[in-house]
Image (tube, rainbow, N blue to C red):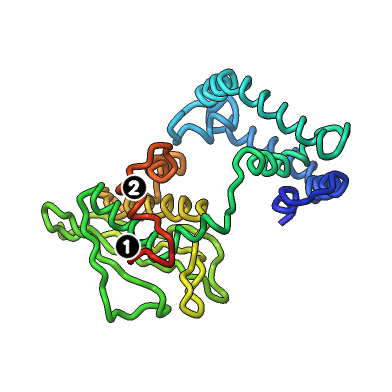
Amino acid sequence: MSLRFLSIARVGSTRKQIAVAYGQKGGNQNVAILEKLVQIRHRLARLLGYSNYSDFAIEPRMPMTSRKVLEFLEEMSEQLSDLANRELTVLKELKMKEEGDAQFGMEDLLYYMKRGEQHKVDLDIGEIKRYFPVKLVISGMLKMFQDLFALRFEEIKDVEVWHDTVRLFSVWDASSSDLLGYFFLDIFSREGKYDHTCVVALQNGCMCSNGSRKVPVAVLLSQCPKEFDGNSALLRFPEVVRIFHEFSHVVHHISNRATFSRFSSLRLEGDFAEIPSLLLENWVLREHFPENDVRLLSGHHKVCQY
């Protein structure tokens, strides 16, 4: 909540007060704990034959060594530093216009990034939402993934689920007609529900000892608004991207062919497991969005059919 407040607080002194209080949570006690943690981690790494804890922690991940991570960060810094400095200059100038000669601090970054976007693109977020009704976004997303990966999703009706808004689908290979797995869509908000958009693996795919295959099962959780008084529930565009990202995890999980459950998609190292979703969310972020895909995912809620 504190970080969100920094993006909307208009008074600079208030932003600074909140940022300082947030940054000093735990005070010196946390400093002592962190110092001890660093020492213990270093001892652990040395006992296991590593020169430092970074090398120990990064070895099972894609870069494999901390040196590669540093090289990547240095390369990115070199490529982006000029752009970052230009953008920071714009934010400083914007603050000067609104608050005078007050120094630009870290507490100002979120607020003026948001203000900069508002100045650059004059958009009515409420109006944009009208073009992303939940039902249309979900049906369009399912259609896009079926076409892209040659899959077939079939909704299973009259099945016992934990809430009447939950939907269950089976997933089939469109070319071979093999059953690949199942997924639940639990996307609408309700009291007491986990308030984060994410995917949970209910069952990992693997080969059984008798030669049969255990198919993967996943659930996509979200907090989409529900229809009210006949009015369509609407999504902000970042929410569309988030759901698309998480459903990419579902498809990754269902399409997995690992022999052992331990190596099922969502149980892999986090940096690798995120690649399909980070790649596929660009399907809705890319500048030249295919017209057919736009029509699948969006349409004014009062005139579109879904």
The answer to whether 110 is drawn above or below residue 67 in the figure is below
Q: List x then y, in percent, for residue 248.
A: 37, 50
Q: Nearer the viewer, residue 239 or 185?
A: 239
Q: Is residue 21 above or below residue 304?
A: above
* Callout 1 amino acid: Val
- Please indicate whether residue 185 sits to the left or right of residue 88 in the image: left
Residue at image point 46% right, 29% down: 64
Q: Which quarter of the figure is the C terminus placed in? A: bottom left
Bin the neighbour count of mark 1 within 10 Å (Cα to Cα): few under 14, some 14-19, many 20 and up.
many
What amino acid is labelled 2 in the image? Phe
Name the element at disc 1.
strand
Dot 2: element: helix
Along the viewing direction, whichever of 62 and 60 lies nearer the viewer: 62
Residue 227 % position (x, y): 48, 74
Apparent side of residue 15 relative to residue 179 in the rendered image (left or right): right
Q: Which residue is mark 1?
A: 217
Q: Residue furthest front?
A: 303
Q: Return the x and y of residue 138 as percentages of the image width and height.
A: 37, 61
In the image, which is nearer the foreground, mark 2 or mark 1? 1
The N terminus - image quarter: bottom right
Q: Quadrant of residue 80?
A: top right
Taking the image as shown, residue 264 lies to the left or right of residue 190, namely left
Side of 207 where 5 appears, left or right:
right
Residue 78, image quadrant: top right
- Residue 287: image quadrant is top left
Q: Residue 289 appears at what percent x and percent y?
A: 37, 41
User: Where is mark 2, residue-wise?
Assistant: 263
**Residue at (60% x, 36% y) in the render:** 44
